[in-house]
Image (cartoon, coloured by chain):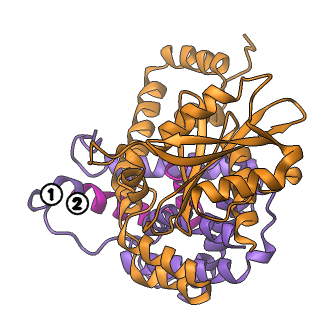
Chain colours: A purple, B orange
């Protein structure tokens, strides 16, 4: 049993990264991670050892996220707080704010697809399972999500200098 | 050349680097004739890199105490210590503490336990006649002997569910300290080794992964013993073995 706990612990950094990008807010992200841990640790017995633990944890997180979004209805605006002028911010901070704002404007399901594939590097198969959709649907959400993100980032009116490395 | 028309899914998979090389070449050739599409693909790659750069550092942060507390709340005492250790040191990042502990940290004098263990793995697994000093037929004697040498009660975990049977074991020297090696083999003749060395005073860690020249290792510290499960296996498969090993050692 403890072996599974070690595996879950190993995934916490990735869960935090995904939750942060998904919610656009540090505290809400860790709330979501905490709920995910509480649920997964109490349901270790439901995990099939033959399966990889990563998709299982992301699935739990995704479902919790959806529940929370339903509760909060559509009134909550995702994304960063109104930002100070870009010139006053450190570059990395400005990048994060820009991306938070752009991601916040994507539909939840598109944002999730873009992040699970692009940042968390889940296979298309695993990402589709996490989101509970067929792989074809995942591919179209991925495509539409990335396309919108591109337009939003291009629309910032600055040259595309956001590549950090 | 399959010559199939290039779909939007092909373009996405190209951005993600998930196309087979032959198909990727076809899609690249298709893009070469369509500058607008090529520019779009470049922008999509740039956006993906930006996302990774912006959110990546979050995964290298130390675990916030309230998240560590989730593990402590439900765990055994040894788990509480592991969670506490994890709260102090970032997990998953390149600056992970076990990385430093196991030797690619800042102390040049500190030996690299994992490199040593992988080296021993390489030396002994090709041996046909003398892969081990004590064969599995004398398992009880082997375990008692190595336990005595290391000063800790060791175990040769049962990995039959993972398809591996014990070949035997041997005593090694790890920079002048005794270390134990257990060798296992599957029906295809693939050999893996489990290394064990005493680390008095060390705290528990989570699983760590490292690969040197195609040989992979999962390693961790538990109850003042450092373990490494080593083999030329897919990461998933090796993890399964490491997990089974950990579970078997937990059973007192």
Question: Residue B60 colored magenta?
Answer: no
Q: In the displayed image of the protein, which residue is found farthest to the left?
A: A88
Q: Secondary structure at mark 2?
A: helix
State the CA–CA distance, disc 2 to disc 1: 5 Å
x, y (%) of residue B5?
70, 22
Q: Splitting the image into 4 quarters, where does residue A160 fall? A: top left
Image side of residue A97 versus residue B206, left or right:
left
Vertical comparison of A14 with B134: above or below: below
Vertical comparison of A85 with A139: above or below: below
Label 1 resides on the chain identified as A
Name the residue rendered at 59%, 77% in the picture. A36
Q: Main secondary structure of the magenta part?
A: helix
* Quadrant of the drawing holding the C terminus of chain A: top left
x, y (%) of residue A1?
73, 73
Image side of residue A57 versus residue B96, left or right:
right
Name the residue rendered at 74%, 45% in the picture. B237
Residue B165 visible in the picture: no
Image side of residue B78 versus residue A127, left or right:
left
The residue to which callout 2 is attached is A93
Highlighted range, magenta: A93-121
Q: Secondary structure at mark 1?
A: loop
Question: In the image, which disc is placed on residue A90?
Answer: 1
CB contact under 8 Å: marks 2 and 1: yes
Question: In the image, which disc is placed on residue A2?
Answer: none
Circle 1 crowding by C-alpha within 10 Å: few under 14, some 14–19, many from 20: few
Name the residue rendered at 46%, 65% in the picture. B200
């Amino acid at each position: 049993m403890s072996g599974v706990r070690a595996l879950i612990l190993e995934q916490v950094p990735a869960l935090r990264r995904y939750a942060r990008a998904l919610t656009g807010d540090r505290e809400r992200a860790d709330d979501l991670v905490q709920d995910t841990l509480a649920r997964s640790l109490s349901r270790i017995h439901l995990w099939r050892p033959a399966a990889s633990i990563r998709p299982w944890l992301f699935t739990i997180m995704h479902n919790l996220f959806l529940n929370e979004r339903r509760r909060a209805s559509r009134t909550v605006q995702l994304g960063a707080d109104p930002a100070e002028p870009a010139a006053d911010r450190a570059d990395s901070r400005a990048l994060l704010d820009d991306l938070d704002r752009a991601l916040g404007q994507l539909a939840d399901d598109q944002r999730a697809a873009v992040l699970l594939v692009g940042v968390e590097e889940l296979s298309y198969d695993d990402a589709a399972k996490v989101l509970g959709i067929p792989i074809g649907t995942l591919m179209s959400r991925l495509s539409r999500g990335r396309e919108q993100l591109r337009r939003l980032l291009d629309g910032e009116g600055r040259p595309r200098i956001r590549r950090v490395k | 050349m399959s010559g199939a028309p290039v779909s939007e899914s092909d373009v996405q998979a190209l951005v993600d680097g998930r196309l087979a090389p032959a198909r990727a070449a076809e899609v690249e050739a298709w893009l070469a004739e369509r500058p607008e599409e090529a520019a779009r693909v470049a922008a999509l790659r740039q956006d993906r890199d930006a996302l990774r750069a912006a959110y990546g550092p979050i995964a290298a942060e130390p675990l916030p105490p309230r998240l560590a507390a989730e593990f402590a709340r439900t765990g055994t005492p040894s788990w509480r210590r592991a969670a506490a250790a994890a709260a102090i040191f970032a997990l998953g990042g390149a600056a992970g503490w076990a990385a430093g502990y196991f030797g690619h940290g800042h102390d040049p004098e500190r030996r690299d336990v994992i490199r040593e263990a992988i080296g021993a793995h390489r030396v002994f697994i090709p041996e046909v006649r003398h892969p081990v000093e004590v064969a599995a037929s004398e398992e009880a004697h082997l375990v008692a002997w190595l336990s005595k040498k290391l000063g800790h009660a060791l175990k040769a975990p049962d990995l039959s569910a993972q398809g591996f049977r014990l070949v035997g074991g041997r005593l090694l020297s790890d920079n002048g300290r005794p270390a134990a090696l257990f060798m296992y083999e599957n029906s295809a003749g693939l050999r893996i080794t489990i290394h064990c060395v005493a680390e008095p005073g060390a705290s528990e860690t989570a699983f760590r992964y490292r690969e040197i020249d195609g040989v992979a290792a999962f390693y961790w510290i538990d109850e003042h013993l450092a373990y490494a499960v080593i083999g030329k296996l897919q990461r998933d498969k090796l993890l399964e073995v490491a997990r089974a090993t950990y579970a078997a050692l937990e059973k007192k």
